[in-house]
Image (cartoon, helix red, strand yellow):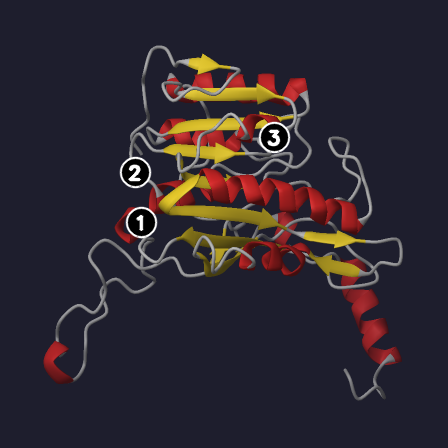
Amino acid sequence: MKQLRKKKLTIRKRYAKENDLTLFHGDCLDLLKQIPDNSAQLVITSPPYNVGKPYEKKESLESYVELQRLVIAEAVRITRDGGSICWQVGHHVNGHRQVFPLDLLLHPLFQSYSSSNEVYLRNRIIWHYEHGLHCKHRFSGRHETILWYTKGKKYIFNLDEVRVPQKYPGKRGHKGANRGKYTGNPLGKNPGDVWIFPNVKSNHIEKTEHPCQFPVELPERLIRALTGPGDLVVDPFMGSGTTAVAAVLNHRRVAGADLVSEYVELARKRTMQAARGKLRYRLSHTPIYVLAANTPLRTVPEEFLQLRLLYAGNNSLNPAT
């Protein structure tokens, strides 16, 4: 992947069109109000999930949705015709262990703009990962959702920029006019609406002190598909600056905000490293690591085998087994 090696980025705290990078410490609504109408090609963010993380104030679901309504209204305003809005969310779990899929709660807020601003849902993308919270009273959550909306009926979608390797690139047609010809696209296949790559845990190459960091590969795929060089990308809930990093690596302008000053400084540090070609990050299409079959980590402990046999014996009369 070609990295941007610009010696010096134009970085400011307040938004200006000529900025390469705007890093705003404060409420995202204050940043968004600085950005003129129809300026951004892409607004992409992952807002807090209202689950009590250190960087958020837990509030009622009604208050949470109201804040999202205000931010979404600004996102629609600053997005230009042909641009996109991507909202990545997970689940809110209340004190009764009841799960609220946030994408279902927030979609009506976007849907309300379908007639006035022609905001349309194009994909509900599932990001699947293998590791996360281990649950005892429900199936462990292993995915999050990205809602991709466009503003207008005509929009930018650069599929060739984000194609992925085919499983069977040498496959040929066996009948009809394509008999004997390769059936796949030479550039790769459409990645589809289920994306599988690791989340950022302690041993991830990109890991920082941010507790809920996202991999560069996630916003990068959307940035490459939905924008062009020089376009403005806006992230209202910037966090550790992953969207900003992906934008800088791909020659896009970017503006982001965060309430935590330490995270704004972290975003500055990471984007500067990206601009200089010094940032370590997981490249797109890197295979997910699979342990060799003969490693101790792949060997089932004898104690586990004994417990499995005991469990199977105790449940031998259970039709569900």
Q: Residue at x 14, y 84 (%)?
A: 176
| Circle 3 crowding by C-alpha within 10 Å: few under 14, some 14–19, many from 20 | some
Q: Residue at x 43, y 35 (%)?
A: 37
Q: Is the Cβ of the residue at disc 1 closer than 8 Å to that at disc 2?
A: yes
Of pointers 3 and 2, the one earlier in the residue sequence? 3
Residue 55, picture quadrant? top right
Which residue is at the far top? 8
Rendered position, 169 above or below 296:
below
Quarter holding the C terminus is: bottom right
SS for dot 1: loop
Residue wearing tag 1 = 156
Indicate which label's residue lies in the foreground, 3 or 2: 3
Quarter holding the N terminus is: top left
Rendered position, 283 above or below 192:
above
SS for dot 3: helix
- Three-letter amino acid code at the position of disc 3: Cys
Query: What percent of the width, then of the height, locates residue 129?
Result: 58, 52
Query: What percent of the width, then of the height, locates residue 254?
Result: 44, 28
- Three-letter amino acid code at the position of disc 1: Ile
Residue wearing tag 3 = 28
